[in-house]
Image (cartoon, grey):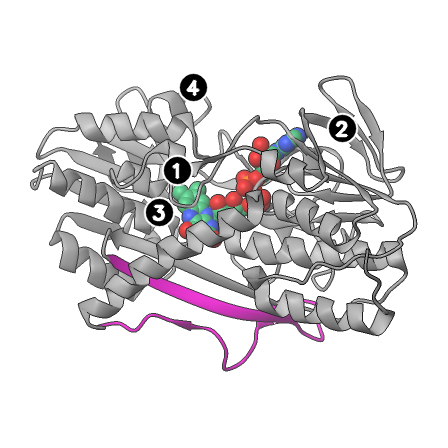
Amino acid sequence: MSTMNRRDFVKLAGAATAVGTVGFPMVGFGAPKASVVVIGGGYAGAIAAKYTKLYVPDAEVTLIERKKEYISHPFSNEVLGGERDMKSLTFTYAGLEKRGLKVLQDEVLDIDIVSKTVKTKGGKSLKADYLIVAPGIEIKWGAIPGYGQEAAELAPHAWEAGPQTLLLKKQIDAMPDGGLLVIVAPANPFRCPPGPYERAAQIAANLTHAGKKKAKIMILDAKDAFSKQALFTEGWKHNYGDMIQWVGASGGGKVMEIDAKTLTAKTEFDDFKANVLNVIPPHRCGAIAAKVGLTDDSGWCPVNQATFESKKAKGVYVVGDSCIAGAMPKSGYAANTQAKVAAANVAGAILGMKIEKPFLTNTCYSLLAHDYGISVAGVYEVGADGVLADVKGSGGISPVGAPLDTRKRESVYGVSWYNNIVSDMFT
Ligand SMILES: Cc1cc2nc3c(=O)[nH]c(=O)nc-3n(C[C@H](O)[C@H](O)[C@H](O)COP(=O)(O)OP(=O)(O)OC[C@H]3O[C@@H](n4cnc5c(N)ncnc54)[C@H](O)[C@@H]3O)c2cc1C
């Protein structure tokens, strides 16, 4: 095992967080004994567990995930488009186990955030020195009147990839030419801001390939603007003509009630009866984080945005969609970089080292067709007010009106992004 002095570690940690998924050189220490439990094995938790173990190989790191296999939400829209199958989204935790982490397939039912004791459905009780909580999101059932768990079996949300994705795909495949598919999009903040609009394009690709060119897709939105709007509008038109229509909140798009039995979305002014109804309802942080007191009134978890340590409990870190991270979107890439910052800070706490303030990164690719991609990228730092904000002059967005060659290259970068990030998570 190699050793490294304090200054080198701190320098490396700063660099690692600046480069996001590019990585952090493996370091080893004769570290004091420490135990770390990570809850949730998704885009945030798998990375937090892996990098904590990389930074402090002597630490006992346990990842608790309720599912045997992880199904990626990113690129699940492409399943709806007929571009991918579920297998290409499905991963086991064997790669992480090979790295010496303990992976426990179990559901966390309770956490004592003071003593850092975790209780599971399988009857286990684990006491840790540090906790990293990464349970993703929970759908707010009933936030739209009429939309509860039973309604989701008729009008799927498909906002957690898995059986819901397959149900929606089946309905799209059975939709008649000339039929209407309605997507109900939520207000901010929500998981994957460009997701509903990429989904519309992918569904249009499916319908077009099936020869159902008279079908219509209507997005009823609870807001008046959305991520990469000009690019989506341009790309929808280019690839699918007038098939996709977007209605913002002030144009009457805010859905007040769902009648799942008749597949009807009711707005203030109109009722829209659909052949397929995809409701993406409001959500909040993963249920376990809310249950144990890690949330504030917003329904999300406040953290020190330079370290991701919870503002509600010392030695407990919250990363990924569950946490409040200033200007960062709730995305898989953001979750990945946040998890690396939390892992570096847990390592720093174990080793008694100060970790520099991080820079965080995010890029969101959206595939509107198999050869048509667009993206937005951001670099973030913590300001004097403690909130993560865009670094001035950094980041960027694909240009409107770019040649098709640019769109094609971005579609290739998007697929490459996916292959790299899941490799970072599971190998
Ligand atoms: C359709 C769609 C497309 C998307 N596309 C992109 C994209 O292209 N790029 C991008 O960057 N992001 C994308 N996202 C967003 C991305 O999926 C999320 O931001 C990301 O998954 C957040 O990671 P997370 O670890 O916080 O949550 P998750 O990945 O959901 O992981 C949470 C994990 O915690 C587990 N868990 C929860 N509670 C417990 C418990 N009590 N006990 C044990 N385990 C528990 C869950 O089973 C789950 O595996 C997309 C999302 C959707 C829905």
Side of 56 where 40 appears, left or right? left
Residue 36 at what x, y percent from top left? Answer: 80, 42
Residue 138 position by quadrant: top right
Q: Nearer the viewer, residue 127 or 318?
A: 127
User: In what element is the residue under mark 1?
Assistant: helix
- Which numbered disc flags the more N-terminal residue, 4 or 3? 4
Amino acid type at mark 1: Ser
- In the picture of the structure, the residue carrying the numbered disc 2 is 110
- Which numbered disc flags the more N-terminal residue, 2 or 1? 1
Side of 175 where 232 appears, left or right? right
Is label 4 or label 3 in front? Answer: 3
Amino acid type at mark 3: Pro
Residue 150: mark in rendering: 4
- Quote the CA–CA distance across marks 2 and 3: 33 Å
- Quote the CA–CA distance across marks 3 and 1: 21 Å
Name the residue: 43% across, 56% down: 417
User: In what element is the residue under mark 4?
Assistant: loop
Q: Nearer the viewer, residue 206 or 176?
A: 206
**CB under 8 Å between discs 2 and 3:** no
- Quote the CA–CA distance across marks 4 and 2: 26 Å
Q: Nearer the viewer, residue 253 or 72?
A: 72
- Quote the CA–CA distance across marks 4 and 3: 22 Å
